[in-house]
Amino acid sequence: MSEQPDQAVVSTRGARRWQGGHPWIFKSDIVRAPATPAGAVHVGDPSGRLLGTALWSPQSEISLRFVSTRDITLDTAWWRARLAAAIARRDGIMDAHTNACRLVHGEGDQLPGLVVDRYGDYLGVQSLSLGIDQRIEWILDLLQEVLKPRGII
């Protein structure tokens, strides 16, 4: 892995935690912070091995929220595909007796820090990280495009 301004290096302990399935890296496990003030970054271990791509939030105790074990670009197509996959997983929950459900459940849907609830024809959206805050307009536009709700709160 080459030195890049958008790269974070985590401790061996942090790398082990991630490889064990934990979706976060805590601030205390950051060995070298990325130069990027916040946003999508590559993450490596002390030996230089790529661990994946994460959303970087330097002020939070949960500093890195992983989105992939690969080197990916979090562009509009990626967000659209992740949102569509999360929504498709809940297909069939809403019926004549159910008018509310959680459509996006953050890390469980590989959309760390994002919660989307459906209440009838409306959506409630929560951003729980700076990485989501930075992309909230894209996300709201994509939710409008895909679900066509009456309103989003």
Image: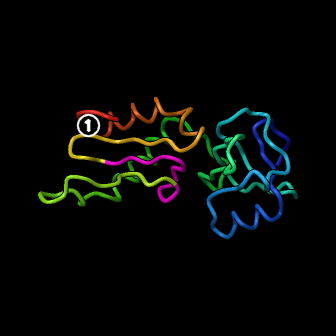
Under circle 1, the secondary element is loop
The one of 11 and 60 positioned closer to us in this rendering: 60
Q: Is residue 127 left or right of residue 47?
A: left
Q: Which percent across, then down, holds residue 2?
A: 84, 44
Residue furthest toward the right? 47
Q: Is residue 69 left or right of residue 82?
A: right
Q: Residue at position x 85%, y 41% from top?
A: 3
Q: Where's the C terminus, which quadrant?
A: top left
Question: Are there few (<14), some (14-19), or many (20+) residues within 10 Å of tag 1?
Answer: some
Q: Quadrant of residue 140?
A: top left
Residue 134 in the image: above or below residue 7: above
Residue furthest toward the left? 96
Which residue is the site of mark 1?
149
Residue bounds of the magenta highlight:
107-117
Q: Is residue 149 magenta?
A: no
Q: Which percent across, then down, holds residue 69?
A: 65, 57
The one of 7 and 1 positioned closer to us in this rendering: 7
Q: Amino acid at mark 1?
A: Pro
Q: Residue at position x 21%, y 41% from top?
A: 121
Q: Which percent across, then down, holds residue 143?
A: 36, 38
Residue 91 in the image: above or below residue 116: below
